[in-house]
Amino acid sequence: MAIDTAKRRDIMETKKIHISEKRQITIPKKFFVMLGFDTEAECVVRGNELVLRPARQNRDGAFAEELLADLIREGYSGEELLCEFKRRQKQIRPAVDAMLEEAKRAAASETEYMTYQEIFDEEDNV
């Protein structure tokens, strides 16, 4: 049984594990169960740390459905629909990365930024 996210954040446990010659590790059973791992894990570099966490399932599912619906409304179908879906989906990650970088620069006062109110006031006036 997995522990809910709020409780997990309060838990701090450490265990030294072995790395094989093939760079393989074994997740201790206690951690595996506690964090709700299944058959896949995400491996993330954060600063000088390697973070291993359960893979998120269908993390872009809702967005993918919206993208697909837009493409159908635009008149795509069949093989052309599949090709255009793949092309646009590849553009999502770079766009998100660019937005995050812009947010970091704004947070560091390196660039101008817009407030929540400014963003939505402009949309209301369109």
Image (tube, rainbow, N blue to C red):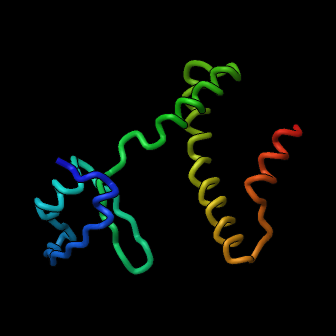
Furthest-left residue in this view:
29
Image location (x, y in percent) of residue 62:
50, 34
Q: Residue at x 65, y 60 (%)?
A: 98
Q: Nearer the viewer, residue 86 or 32?
A: 32
Q: Is residue 105 left or right of residue 53?
A: right
Tell me if residue 92 comes above or below residue 82 in the rendering: below
Image location (x, y in percent) of residue 15:
16, 75
Q: Is residue 53 left or right of residue 69?
A: left
Image location (x, y in percent) of residue 60:
48, 41
Q: Nearer the viewer, residue 30 or 17?
A: 30
Q: State the quadrant of the C terminus.
A: top right
Image location (x, y in percent) of residue 84:
61, 33
Q: Residue at x 17, y 67 (%)?
A: 25
Q: Residue at x 88, y 39 (%)?
A: 125
Residue 76 falls in which quadrant of the image?
A: top right
Q: Is residue 52 left or right of residue 102?
A: left
Residue 106 falls in which quadrant of the image?
A: bottom right
